[in-house]
Structure formats: structure tokens, C-alpha cells
Image (spheres, rainbow, N blue to C red):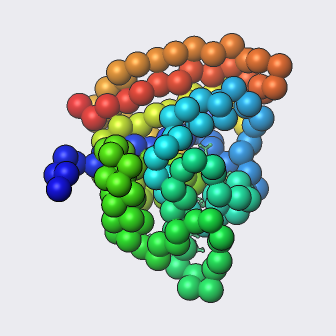
Amino acid sequence: MNAQPVHIILVAAIGENGIIGSDGQLPWRLKSDLQHFKRVTSGRPVVMGRKTFESIGRPLPNRTNIVMTRDLQFAAPGTTLATSLDAALAIGRDDARRRGIHEIMIIGGGDVFDSTMAMADRLEITHVHASPKGDVAFPAIDPAVWREAARQHYDAGPDDDASFDTVTYERR
Ligand SMILES: NC(=O)c1ccc[n+]([C@@H]2O[C@H](COP(=O)([O-])OP(=O)(O)OC[C@H]3O[C@@H](n4cnc5c(N)ncnc54)[C@H](OP(=O)(O)O)[C@@H]3O)[C@@H](O)[C@H]2O)c1
């Protein structure tokens, strides 16, 4: 038995205005951040809401895709469906332990971030240097609760709409 706790990590890209989504899609094109997202989440269980799964359109490779929905008719080949947050986290914990790791990555969207922020152990945030219009936002990151532990700056590459900083926040 491996009794080491499995940590809950939120992974999000956020505009300077807090926006993370627009019309069911990401509000920017950021190829360099998608590469960062792949590095951070690969080989791990990823938990997402049904709307985020539909916006991605396919299971993410090399990760256990856990999709939350209350719709018992919903079908998403290549994923594991969960009808509650508790069920999603239980599936994620089992999968993480099977993989010999101690992390469940919560990858959105806004609805799922809102309901998991209070239980998160770490945040892996891409702060995008842009303020796009949108309809979904990330919850506030309270500096009294979260301490910045690492930061890396990325200039905008040829396939990026903006420059960005990736920041790791740990709970104080
Ligand atoms: N910038 C980023 O880092 C980032 C990351 C991810 C997504 N996004 C963006 O965010 C937007 C999507 O976010 P969203 O808030 O609209 O939707 P979402 O969080 O992706 O999905 C919401 C859906 O998840 C299911 N769900 C949520 N909580 C549940 C629970 N406790 N039990 C069972 N099912 C549950 C429900 O599905 P049913 O309705 O099927 O029951 C709910 O309608 C898109 O624009 C996307 O591009 C941005």
C-alpha cells in the first residue's frame, strides 16, 4: 500500500483580466504554452469538465482523461467519465498511485476550477500578458493563501498571441 497523499494541482492559463475562456474555446493562440501544458500534465491523471473536453475534442494522449458530467448518456471514448467531483478524484487517486506518482491535475474549465480551488495543494498558472474578451474566468488567487514558488518568463514565439509567465503557487 502507498499511503502518501495525492496532491491536487490546478493547471490554467489566465489573462491579466482573469479570463480563461471565450465561447467554449481558449481566448488566444499560444503554442508555447500548450507545450508547457503538455510537460506539466503528461503521464498523469487529468480531470476536466465536459465542456472543456468538448472544446479539446479528443482525449489528451499519454494521460488518463477523467471527464466530469452529470449526463448519464454522455459518451467519450478514450476517457473515464465521473458523475461527481468525489468520483473524479477517487478515480484520479487510484490512477496516480498505479502510476507511482502523487498528483492529480485539474485542467478546467471555470466551473471545475471554482469547485476545486479550495482543495488545491498547488497551482501551475500561465499568466498571459493579454486581456481578451471572454465569458469564463479563473477564481481569484489570494496572496494571503498562495505563495509564488517559481516563475519563468516566455517571450511570444511565432505561434503565440502574447508573451506569458508560468508561475507555480504553493499554499502558505
Ligand atoms: N485557459 C485555460 O486554462 C482553460 C482551461 C480549461 C478550459 N478553458 C476554457 O473554459 C471554458 C469551459 O469552462 P466552463 O466553466 O464553461 O465548463 P467546464 O468546467 O469545462 O465544464 C462544466 C461541465 O462539467 C460538468 N461538471 C462540473 N462539475 C461537475 C460535478 N461536480 N459533477 C459532475 N459533472 C460536473 C458539467 O457537465 P454536464 O453539463 O455535461 O453535466 C458541467 O456543465 C472553455 O471556454 C474552455 O476553452 C480554459
Q: Tell me what residue is drawn at x 63 percent, y 49 percent.
A: 61
Where does the N terminus fall, quadrant-wise?
bottom left
Left/right of residue 11 with respect to residue 21 in the rendered view: left
Q: Quadrant of residue 14?
A: top right
- Report the label total: 0
Q: Quadrant of the C terminus?
A: top left
Q: Residue furthest right?
A: 158
Is the residue 55 above or below the residue 82 in the image? Answer: above
Q: Nearer the viewer, residue 69 or 39?
A: 39
Q: In screen coordinates, is 5 left or right of 50?
A: left
Q: Is residue 118 visible?
A: no
Residue 152 visible within the image = yes
Front residue of 145 and 169 = 169
Among the 4 quarters of the image, the one containing residue 75: bottom right
Instruction: Please tell me which residue is depicted at 47% across the width and 25% down the height of the picture.
Output: 167
Q: Is residue 94 left or right of residue 28?
A: left
Taking depth in this image into account, of 75 and 18 the one nearest to the observer is: 75
Where residue 157 sits: x, y (%)?
76, 18
**Quadrant in which ligand 1 is drawn:** bottom right
Q: Is residue 45 above or below residue 126?
A: below
Could you say which quadrant of the image residue 86 lies in? bottom left
- Percent x, y for residue 3? 16, 52
Residue 151, image x and y in percent? 46, 17
Vertical comparison of 36 with 89: above or below: above
In the shown orientation, is residue 65 left or right of residue 164? left
Residue 150 percent across, percent down from the top left: 40, 19
Residue under the point 66% across and 35% down:
34
